[in-house]
Amino acid sequence: MIDLAYLDEAGFSMTLPVCYSWYPVGERLCIAYEAPQGRRVNAIGAYFSHGPCAGHFAYQTWASLPPHARNAKRKTPEQVAADYGLHLEEIGPINTSRLLAFFWQLAGRPENAPVGWKRERP
């Protein structure tokens, strides 16, 4: 029996888009400006619909930092992350290495698996 999972990634911005929004007809929409830089959460998730893991949902998220925080000259990346209450591993985009690590996590691979590791089930 195989596992069938639906996987998707998304980015969530914490600022309201000014180009379209819902508001009562006949009223004027006023939105306070918020700088969109560094206000993003990147997420990836998988939902298993069939197989032994059916009904299981797994996800991971990462935050983006404002450009001035990422480019801080006097602090290490770890210190900048700590200023926002995050660990260094919780910051950044979904890149290839993070996507592959997420796939391995879904497959049940241990973190310190040997090079030729394979699942018990295909």
Image (cartoon, rainbow, N blue to C red):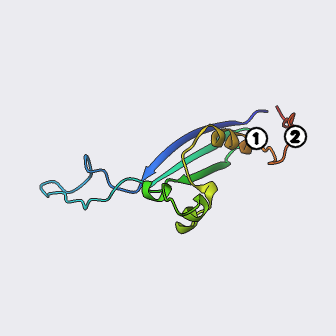
**Is 94 placed above or below 122 here?**
below
Q: Of label 2 and label 1, which has the lower sequence position?
A: 1
At 66% from the left edge and 40% from the top edge, which residue is drawn?
A: 97
At 72% from the left edge and 43% from the top edge, which residue is drawn?
A: 106
**Quadrant housing residue 67:** bottom left
At 12% from the left edge and 55% from the top edge, which residue is drawn?
A: 26
Q: Which mark is residue 82?
A: none
Percent coordinates x, y for residue 83 in the rendering: 53, 68
Say what amino acid the circle numbered 2 marks: Pro
**Is disc 1 surrounded by few (<14), some (14 to 19) or many (20+) residues within 10 Å?**
some
Helix, strand or loop at mark 1 = helix
Q: Which mark is residue 107?
A: 1
Percent coordinates x, y for residue 25 in the rendering: 16, 54
Say what amino acid the circle numbered 1 marks: Ala
**Quadrant housing residue 32:** bottom left
Helix, strand or loop at mark 2 = loop
Q: Residue furthest left?
A: 26
For the N terminus, give its image quadrant.
Answer: top right
* Closer to the camera in the image, 88 or 73: 73
Percent coordinates x, y for residue 120 in the rendering: 87, 37
Q: Which residue is mark 2?
A: 114
In the drawing, does residue 2 fall left or right of residue 86?
right
